[in-house]
Amino acid sequence: MEDLKKELKLKIIEALNLEDMSVEDISDDEMLFEEGLGLDSIDALELIIILDKDYGIKLTDSKDGKKIFRSIETMATYIAEHRSK
Amino acid sequence: MNSCFINGIGCVSAQNTFENTFFEDAIDISNLNIVKAIKPNYKSFIPPASIRRMSAGVKNSIVASSVAIKEASADQLDGIIVGTGLGCIQDSENFLNKMIGYNEEYLTPTAFIQSTHNTVSGQIALKLKCKAYNFTYVNTGGSFQSALIDGLLMFEGEEANNILIGGVDEHAEYTNKLYQAIGYYRQDEEGKKNILKQRKSGVIPGEGASYFVLGNEQSDSTYAKILDVQLVNKLDQIDLPSFILDFLSKNELKLDEIDVVILGNNGDDEFDTYYDEASSIFESSTLLYYKHLFGEFLTSSSVATYIAAKILREQVIPEHLLGEQKVRKSDKIGNILIYNQYRGKDHSLILMEDV
């Protein structure tokens, strides 16, 4: 699980071009949207692509996204349970 | 024509134009194959959340335009007009690379949104919350000049008091390789030369963003006055002298009344002959060059405009712009003419006067 969280952080930093951030700057339970990392709706689309492309998870209900993308912790837990890649 | 004054300038380039020390010292770029702009401290001008989605051209434009607007103390702009040869080519490449790499699936919006040519003027307007006229010209080597002509026409029609005009282009890795492959850019081993001393096929590519606040009134920050701009797409070399003479005649000027001519020599042996032709008719004017210090890009004449404006205000000619030439006129610098062309096309003349 720790490896998956680190991998996720690296993917997010790269996909969202968070130039000045490193893995250490993102805590596992930090809010990804609004407060915390301050991501927005365009970033949410990038995260959906990461889930689909890299882990084979297709999100169909936007309500799920709100829970899944709450933090690195919630993302990693969901990926571990649902991944097909 | 109504008066058009340059009241503020911001220039991000391969030289220290942003730090405003370029007239004292120039950085030698003759060992480079690709000339990149010096990055200013973007965070001083753009919120971190926005920076991450911007390519170099957008960031450089926001910084340069902010500096120009601040210098001109222009609280309200009546237009934002940008000229760009290749637009936001970095994000265009990024988007297309993803399309190919992911087999036309998984396409995210960021690069696509940012890849359009008018991203630059749009982002500047968003930052300023400016809902005035907003236009982008993408006319290859005449892009900046087209923006300038549009601005002058707005003053002519008394439609504006202050307008922001800019020229911007950025490097993109794959595009550079394509231009090198077709011989427009010099091959690696041929690049490391001073282009003024050794002509070869192709040019050394550069990038930059130069922005100007133009106003219909002179102010304490005024650099110079723009008198006229002319642009033609095609011109045979034999017709160049009459093109220049007609333009000067239209502006009631004679050849010997032009104190300085800024030429766009880029070292391309096939097309620098146009500049030789232009040089030959100006016997008493001081001839200046700049692309050996900035590289060649489709909106590089915006850099020449920056140089001309600074010379006219400071009445100083930096030695590093003389190349092998000498100052021919040592008295007051009153009129400067900028002549530019790219690969034998998009011939432009920009005429400026001191105030």
Image: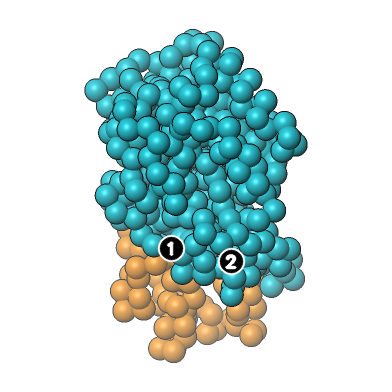
Chain colours: A orange, B cyan
In the current view of this chain or complex, which residue is farthest to the left? B220
As shown in the figure, which amino acid type bears the numbered disc 2? Answer: Glu
- Residue identified by numbered label 2: B173
Residue at 41% x, 66% y: name it. Answer: A18
Label 1 belongs to which residue? B29
The reply to whether callout 2 and callout 1 are in contact (CB within 8 Å) is no
Give the mark nearest the N terminus, 2 or 1. Answer: 1
> At x 56% / y 68%, what residue is drawn?
B191
Tell me the chain of label 2: B
Residue B84 at x, y percent in the picture: 57, 43
- Asked which secondary structure carries label 1, the reply is loop
Q: Amino acid at mark 1?
A: Ile
Helix, strand or loop for disc 2: helix
Sort mark 1 into few (<14), some (14-19) or many (20+) by Cα contacts within 10 Å. many
Above or below for B202 versus B304:
below
Viewer can see residue B229: yes
Q: Which residue does the image show at 72% across and 31% down from the upper left? A: B239
A27, above or below B338, in the image = below
User: Can the viewer see residue B175?
Assistant: no
Point out residue B65 in the picture as x, y percentages from the top left corner.
39, 39
Nearest the viewer among B211 and B118 is B211
- The quadrant where residue B264 appears: top right
Please report, as a chain letter, where disc 1 is located.
B
Mark 2 neighbour class, 10 Å CA radius: few under 14, some 14 to 19, many 20 or more: few
Q: What's the CA distance linking mark 2 and mark 1?
A: 19 Å
Tell which of B216 and B29 is nearer to you.
Answer: B29
